[in-house]
Image (cartoon, rainbow, N blue to C red):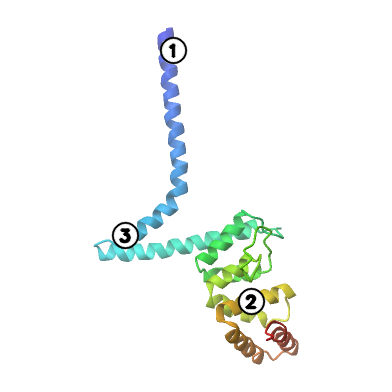
Amino acid sequence: MTTFYRATLALLVLGILCISTRGVGKSKHDKATQPAARISEHIKALDSKDRHERQSAYKQAIKQRQNNIATLIALAQKQLKGVKVLGSGDPALYAIRLLGEYRAAEAVPFLLKNIALPYGGEVDSRSLLGPNPCAQSLVKIGKPASKACIRRLSRPTGSERETWLLVQVVKQVEGKEIARQMILQAIKTQPHPKKLKTSNSVLNKYFRK
């Protein structure tokens, strides 16, 4: 094989490799932006002239939201294994905050389980809940979270910190007076003396005037 042909072949192989490399990079980029693109397509399709297309887009957008929430919960659960304090920029921190932004009632059990997990990063001094991302997301979720907190408060177990956070979530969602009435009602439905004592102590300690 002459030198000319060898050089030509080498250039041809190099060209193929470059094209392949660009193709791989594009594929990764496409995968990274695919979910956002799908959501955008669903929203745009709501303006379609076709009624069936609009209905399909609506259902697909809901399904995409549900998939996103399930993915966020799974991500946070995986990242929180063995973690005692959330750091600034942790994947779990972003997942927890997004669950609040999604108003994801499906995430309430997970957020309640980790409500006392503190955050070690910079905290907004205006937040009454302080460094507690799970509690903050529960407040954003609203009524479903408030009802779940009331049920959890009826249990005699739980740390002082957890009890305080549960009460604060209910107070911020419902308002102080309504929150007090809700906890009073929960007390009346608890026949167990130990639970009754715990609930009374909550009222006396966290609802002082």
Discs 3, 2 touching: Cβ within 8 Å: no
For disc 1, the marked residue is 6
Corner quadrant of residue 162: bottom right
Mark 2 = which residue?
Answer: 168
Of tags 3 and 1, the one toward the viewer is: 3
**How far apart in space, not on screen, are marks 3 and 1 (Cα)?**
54 Å
Q: Secondary structure at mark 3?
A: helix
Residue 37 as seen in the image, left or right of residue 53: right
Which label sits on residue 45?
3
Q: Residues within 10 Å of mark 2 (few under 14, many from 20)?
A: many
x and y, in percent, of residue 111 in the image: 61, 68
**Residue 30 at x, y percent in the picture:** 43, 45
Q: Secondary structure at mark 2?
A: helix
36 horizontally vs 174: left or right: left
Tell which tag, 3 or 2, sits nearer the viewer: 2
Q: CA distance from mark 2 to mark 1?
A: 76 Å
Q: Residue 131's spot in the image, x, y percent?
A: 66, 65
Q: Residues within 10 Å of mark 1 (few under 14, many from 20)?
A: few
Q: How many marks?
A: 3
Q: Amino acid at mark 1?
A: Arg
The mark that comes first in sequence, 3 or 2, is: 3
Could you tell me the amino acid type at mark 2? Gln
Residue 54, horizontal then vertical, whole percent: 30, 64
Return the disc, 3 or 1, that comes first in the chain's sequence: 1
Q: From this viewpoint, which residue is outermost toward the left?
A: 49
Asked whether 109 or 145 is in front, the reply is 145
